[in-house]
């Protein structure tokens, strides 16, 4: 039982498999130990670690594509007892896209932290929690057994609770409570499902389960499948289980929302894809999944159309577009899996980009409420460009990857030929159109129409940290009074942009005149910062913009390299359908 | 192999109690609910290892089948650690909510209500316009009176202190 697996484990690439989990965890521990000192070193450390994870993921994808799944037995313990990490094509591809996105979001957040009047929170809390989140996501993608998948989920969830409630403001505690309770319930369900699977089959190893679940009575197998699908459905925000998402995401700081929207739901989709293809092939729940996909598509996009806040609109489109991926998973054909994988890769990138842009919009306009925004295309053409491209990409305008992913899924649906599949094809097309409608509405309101008179002035304070300390409050009070005395309507000139990245921040109280600028109106989500003090600026800070542009380019790269990427996702789908390569690589049989 | 029925019953009762508490509004009750729920599931998971057996460390010579399955115990240990950490986090959050707003009830989503209210308003405006066309404004006063009555009824909602009301009828 304790014997080392022979040949398969000995390849050099398999030694790389644990690195995407181990590296961020070690870095997070190191950062907690360093604390608040050496801030610049710490920023570099985070960036270097995530770049290393990106490089490792790329190497893993190449190895998995050329030589089959890469397997690592933790401590040299063989499958029935030990923990296994597996990087096959699907895992490695997910890992590659997610690490690219997390790196960009980290750079954005570093830029934002430097641009804000940053307090201690980001460095001491945000960075370690973010790295733990990355480790949890990597662990979920690489997990070769059900319990390790549960642990990966818990790691990323625990980090996400911290990130979502960062700063501990009223809005975030309210949103965090909903999120934490729903996630806790899904965790308990996951544990129950794992217990059922273990009690029934005597193993939690995915490769072993692939063989054993087929021998179980069909009722037990169905119970396990329903329990697992419910858990992953909550994670992925599939319609009847999606109500928590638009409620909790929009209140977090922009980078946090972006990475949640991009990655956390996709971890659920990945888990669904993995279990449906490996554990329950040819399942009886195909129609249930198709109906859930249909409901997600419809309800999500109608919710998006009704919203007047950009972040909430994006959250609802997120729910809606999860339906596309579930559609592909439900079809369970080569084309369906291939389309779903492609769409996941595309959607991670585009949705993250759009939420980052929403953060930039908030910095320029002072709010993400579409009713109060306007004229941004004239005020900040760069911002308009980085919104327009990913928005059209999400809606699926022809040359872009959103269109290609949707066409892949629609073709798989037509190839399937069932009546429900055709209904889904029609609904998917209608959803694409409605997405276009919702996003052009946002574009027209926020960017294209004339600027409203009350558009927040440069230098308006978006969010000042709510702290309990009497001293800080009185300090801010004094600052407010001081700037009031400086003479009411004095505004900073266009030249003295308040905070550019890289430069040192101006001394407090001089340029930060909040006197003339109206405070954010009641009901507006005050979400801009990690707990520092953000102000609106004429142009987006360069480092934040650079990270966003990098993500836009990544989204465009999916279009340019669509041919090779579709070939890869097709091979991935083949591997998922065959099952044999995965099982053989892990069990050695 | 004989299963321990006590373990299953205890686990079931804990899960049921935890689920009931989870439906409540106050965060502290929800914390208690997750603790019960987590422990109940742990007991159920433990029951998957079969009947209790000898400890392998103390009796190295004991035969293989007298030892219980160690894997569920390892699972449960991991799950206990996770539940503990999350309980600590939830308790902190409940305290913070109490600090900020003087209560720890889980709040409704304001923005969501706003969207719903806007739709209601539009609907009502449409109905009013139709009524005006038909009855030249007589409907408006009636509608306003009805709306005021409804608002008043909503304000004086009874039974806030009854724990069952918060568990079963708390959703507004």
Image (tube, coloured by chain):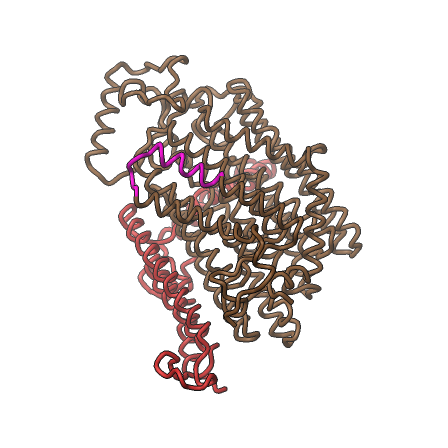
Question: Residue A373: horizontal and vertical position, in percent?
Answer: 49, 26
Q: Which residues are magenta?
A: A34-51
Residue A521 falls within the magenta-colored stretch = no
**Residue at 72% from the left image edge and 48% from the top image edge:** A570
The majority secondary structure of the magenta stretch comes to: helix
**Residue at 50% of width from left, 35% of height from top?**
A104
Q: Is residue A585 above or below residue B69?
A: above
In the image, what residue occupies the spot 55% across and 33% down?
A551
Is residue B171 shown above or below B53? above
**Res. B166 in view:** no
Chain colored red: B
Q: Which one is nearer the viewer's eye here, A76 or A225?
A: A76
Name the one closer to the observer, A83 or A550.
A83
Q: Position of residue A369 (x, y in %)?
A: 48, 32
Q: Quadrant of residue A526?
A: top left
Q: Is residue A42 magenta?
A: yes
Left or right: where does residue A16 sit relative to residue B66?
Answer: right
Between A186 and A500, the residue placed more toward the observer is A500
Q: Taking A412 as reference, is A286 above or below it?
A: below
Q: Quadrant of residue B122?
A: top right
Q: Which chain: brown?
A: A
């Amino acid at each position: 039982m304790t014997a080392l697996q022979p040949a398969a484990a000995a390849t050099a690439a398999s030694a790389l498999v644990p690195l995407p989990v181990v590296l961020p965890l070690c870095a997070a521990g190191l950062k907690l130990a360093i604390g608040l000192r050496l801030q610049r070193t710490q920023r570099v450390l985070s960036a270097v670690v995530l770049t290393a994870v990106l490089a490792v993921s790329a190497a893993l994808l190449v190895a998995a594509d050329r030589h089959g799944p890469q397997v690592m037995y933790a401590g040299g313990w063989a499958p029935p007892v030990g923990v296994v990490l597996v990087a096959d094509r699907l895992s490695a591809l997910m890992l590659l896209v997610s690490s690219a996105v997390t790196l960009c979001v980290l750079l954005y957040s570093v830029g934002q932290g430097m641009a804000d009047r940053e307090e201690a929170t980001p460095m001491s809390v945000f960075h370690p929690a973010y790295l733990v989140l990355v480790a949890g996501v990597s662990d979920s993608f690489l997990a070769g057994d059900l319990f390790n998948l549960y642990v990966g989920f818990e790691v990323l969830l625990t980090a996400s609770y911290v990130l979502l409630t960062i700063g501990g403001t009223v809005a975030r505690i309210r949103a965090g409570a909903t999120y934490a309770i729903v996630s806790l319930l899904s965790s308990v369900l996951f544990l129950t499902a794992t217990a059922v699977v273990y009690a029934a089959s005597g193993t939690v190893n995915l490769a072993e389960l692939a063989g054993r679940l087929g021998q179980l009575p069909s009722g037990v197998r169905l119970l396990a499948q329903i329990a697992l699908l419910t858990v992953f459905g909550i994670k992925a925000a599939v319609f009847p289980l999606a109500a928590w998402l638009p409620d909790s995401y929009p209140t977090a700081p922009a980078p946090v929302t972006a990475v949640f929207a991009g990655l956390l739901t996709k971890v659920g989709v990945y888990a669904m894809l993995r279990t449906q293809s490996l554990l329950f092939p040819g399942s009886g729940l195909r129609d249930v999944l198709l109906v859930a996909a249909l409901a997600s598509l419809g309800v999500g996009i109608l919710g998006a159309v009704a919203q007047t806040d950009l972040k909430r609109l994006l959250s609802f489109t997120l729910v809606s577009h999860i339906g596309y991926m579930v559609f592909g998973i439900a079809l369970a054909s080569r084309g369906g899996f291939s389309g779903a994988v492609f769409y996941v890769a595309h959607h991670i990138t585009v949705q993250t980009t759009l939420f980052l842009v929403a953060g930039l919009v908030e910095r320029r306009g002072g709010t993400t409420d579409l009713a109060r925004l306007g004229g941004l295309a004239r005020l900040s053409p760069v911002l308009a460009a980085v919104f327009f491209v990913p928005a059209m990409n999400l809606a699926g305008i022809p040359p872009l990857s959103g269109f290609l992913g949707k066409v892949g899924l629609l073709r798989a649906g037509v190839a399937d030929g069932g009546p429900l599949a055709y209904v889904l094809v029609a609904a998917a097309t209608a959803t694409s159109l409605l997405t276009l409608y919702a996003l052009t509405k946002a574009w027209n309101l926020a960017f294209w129409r004339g600027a409203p008179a009350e558009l927040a002035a440069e230098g308006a304070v978006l969010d000042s940290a709510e702290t309990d300390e009497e001293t800080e409050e009185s300090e801010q009070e004094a600052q407010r009074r001081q700037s009031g005395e400086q003479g009411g309507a004095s505004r900073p000139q266009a030249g003295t942009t308040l905070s550019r990245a890289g430069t040192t921040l101006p001394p407090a109280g001089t340029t930060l005149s909040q006197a003339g600028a109206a405070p954010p109106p009641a009901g507006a989500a005050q979400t801009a910062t990690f707990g520092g003090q953000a102000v609106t600026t004429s142009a987006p800070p360069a480092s934040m913009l650079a990270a966003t542009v990098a993500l836009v380019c990544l989204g465009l790269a999916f279009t340019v390299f669509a041919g090779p990427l579709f070939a890869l996702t097709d091979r991935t789908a083949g591997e998922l359908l065959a099952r044999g390569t995965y099982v053989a690589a892990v069990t050695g049989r | 192999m004989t299963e321990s029925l006590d373990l299953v019953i205890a686990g079931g009762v804990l899960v049921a109690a935890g689920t009931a508490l989870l439906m409540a509004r106050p965060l502290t009750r929800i914390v208690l609910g997750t603790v019960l729920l987590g422990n109940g599931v742990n007991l159920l998971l433990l029951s998957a290892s079969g009947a209790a057996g000898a400890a392998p460390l103390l009796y190295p010579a004991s035969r293989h089948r007298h030892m219980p399955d160690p894997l569920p115990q390892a699972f449960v240990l991991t799950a206990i650690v996770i539940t503990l950490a999350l309980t600590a986090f939830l308790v902190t959050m409940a305290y913070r909510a109490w600090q900020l707003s003087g209560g720890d009830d889980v709040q409704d989503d304001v923005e969501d209500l706003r969207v719903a209210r806007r739709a209601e308003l539009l609907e009502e405006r449409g109905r009013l316009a139709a009524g005006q066309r038909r009855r030249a404004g007589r409907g408006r006063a009636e509608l306003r009176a009805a709306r005021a009555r409804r608002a008043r009824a909503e304000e004086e909602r009874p039974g806030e202190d009854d724990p069952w009301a918060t568990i079963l009828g708390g959703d507004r």
